[in-house]
Amino acid sequence: MSDQKFVEQIKELVIARLQVLPPDASISIGSEGSFTRDELIVHVKKNDELGKKITEVELEYLKMLKEGIFYAQNNSNY
Protein backbone atom coordinates (compact mmCIF):
# COMPACT_ATOMS: atom_id res chain seq x y z
CA MET A 1 0.00 0.00 0.00
CA SER A 2 1.36 3.41 -0.91
CA ASP A 3 1.95 6.03 1.75
CA GLN A 4 -0.61 8.35 0.15
CA LYS A 5 -3.30 5.66 0.19
CA PHE A 6 -2.50 4.94 3.85
CA VAL A 7 -2.79 8.65 4.72
CA GLU A 8 -6.15 8.84 2.93
CA GLN A 9 -7.45 5.81 4.85
CA ILE A 10 -6.38 7.36 8.15
CA LYS A 11 -8.15 10.62 7.21
CA GLU A 12 -11.31 8.65 6.35
CA LEU A 13 -11.17 6.91 9.74
CA VAL A 14 -10.77 10.20 11.62
CA ILE A 15 -13.57 11.82 9.62
CA ALA A 16 -15.87 8.85 10.33
CA ARG A 17 -15.14 9.18 14.06
CA LEU A 18 -15.86 12.92 13.95
CA GLN A 19 -19.13 12.38 12.07
CA VAL A 20 -20.63 10.51 15.03
CA LEU A 21 -20.42 13.69 17.11
CA PRO A 22 -23.54 15.85 17.28
CA PRO A 23 -23.38 18.59 14.60
CA ASP A 24 -23.68 21.33 17.20
CA ALA A 25 -20.92 19.94 19.43
CA SER A 26 -18.10 22.37 20.12
CA ILE A 27 -14.61 21.06 20.76
CA SER A 28 -11.83 23.19 22.17
CA ILE A 29 -8.37 22.60 20.72
CA GLY A 30 -6.01 24.32 23.14
CA SER A 31 -5.01 27.81 22.04
CA GLU A 32 -6.44 27.18 18.55
CA GLY A 33 -9.99 27.88 19.78
CA SER A 34 -13.30 26.04 19.63
CA PHE A 35 -14.56 24.27 16.55
CA THR A 36 -17.74 22.54 15.45
CA ARG A 37 -17.73 18.98 14.21
CA ASP A 38 -18.00 20.15 10.59
CA GLU A 39 -15.15 22.64 10.98
CA LEU A 40 -12.92 19.88 12.34
CA ILE A 41 -13.83 17.64 9.39
CA VAL A 42 -12.87 20.43 6.95
CA HIS A 43 -9.47 20.78 8.64
CA VAL A 44 -8.85 17.03 8.48
CA LYS A 45 -9.82 16.95 4.78
CA LYS A 46 -7.51 19.89 4.03
CA ASN A 47 -4.74 18.15 6.00
CA ASP A 48 -3.64 21.53 7.36
CA GLU A 49 -1.78 21.89 10.66
CA LEU A 50 -4.96 21.70 12.73
CA GLY A 51 -6.20 18.72 10.70
CA LYS A 52 -2.91 16.93 11.29
CA LYS A 53 -3.16 17.63 15.03
CA ILE A 54 -6.73 16.29 15.16
CA THR A 55 -5.60 13.17 13.30
CA GLU A 56 -2.66 12.69 15.65
CA VAL A 57 -4.89 13.00 18.72
CA GLU A 58 -7.46 10.55 17.32
CA LEU A 59 -4.79 7.99 16.45
CA GLU A 60 -3.22 8.31 19.90
CA TYR A 61 -6.66 7.79 21.48
CA LEU A 62 -7.26 4.66 19.40
CA LYS A 63 -3.83 3.34 20.27
CA MET A 64 -4.45 3.82 24.01
CA LEU A 65 -7.90 2.25 23.69
CA LYS A 66 -6.35 -0.78 21.98
CA GLU A 67 -3.73 -1.10 24.71
CA GLY A 68 -6.40 -0.99 27.41
CA ILE A 69 -5.11 2.16 29.07
CA PHE A 70 -8.66 3.42 29.67
CA TYR A 71 -9.72 0.28 31.47
CA ALA A 72 -8.64 -1.08 34.82
CA GLN A 73 -6.90 -4.25 33.74
CA ASN A 74 -6.52 -5.74 37.20
CA ASN A 75 -9.67 -4.37 38.84
CA SER A 76 -12.06 -7.12 39.89
CA ASN A 77 -15.01 -4.72 39.65
CA TYR A 78 -14.89 -4.85 35.83
Image: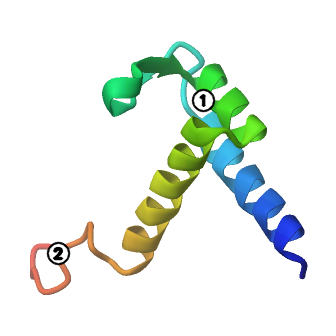
Residue 9 at what x, y percent from top left? Answer: 80, 62
Q: Which residue is mark 2?
A: 72
Q: Is residue 77 above or below residue 41?
A: below
| Residue drawn at point x = 73 percent, y = 52 percent | 11
Q: Which residue is mark 1?
A: 40
| Residue drawn at point x = 76 percent, y = 38 percent | 45
> Image check: 23 left or right of 74?
right
Number of residues whose C-alpha sits closer than 10 Å to that of mark 2, classed few (under 14), some (14–19) or many (20 or more) = few
| Residue drawn at point x = 83 percent, y = 74 percent | 3
> Image check: 69 left or right of 25?
left
Residue 4 at what x, y percent from top left? Answer: 86, 66
The tag earlier along the polypeptide, 1 or 2, is 1
> Image check: 54 left or right of 7?
left
Q: Nearer the viewer, residue 16 or 54?
A: 54
Dots 1 and 2: beta carbons under 8 Å?
no
The three-letter amino acid code for the residue at tag 2 is: Ala
Residue 23 at what x, y percent from top left? Answer: 60, 18
| Quarter where residue 49 is shown | top right
Question: Circle 1 sits in a helix, a strand or a loop, which is it?
Answer: helix
| Residue drawn at point x = 77 percent, y = 63 percent | 7
Q: How many marks?
A: 2
Q: Is residue 71 above or below residue 24?
A: below
Report, in whole angstroms, how far the alpha carbon at label 1 lies from the one at label 2. Answer: 31 Å
Location of the N terminus (image quadrant): bottom right
Residue at the extreme top:
24
Q: Nearer the viewer, residue 6 or 69?
A: 6
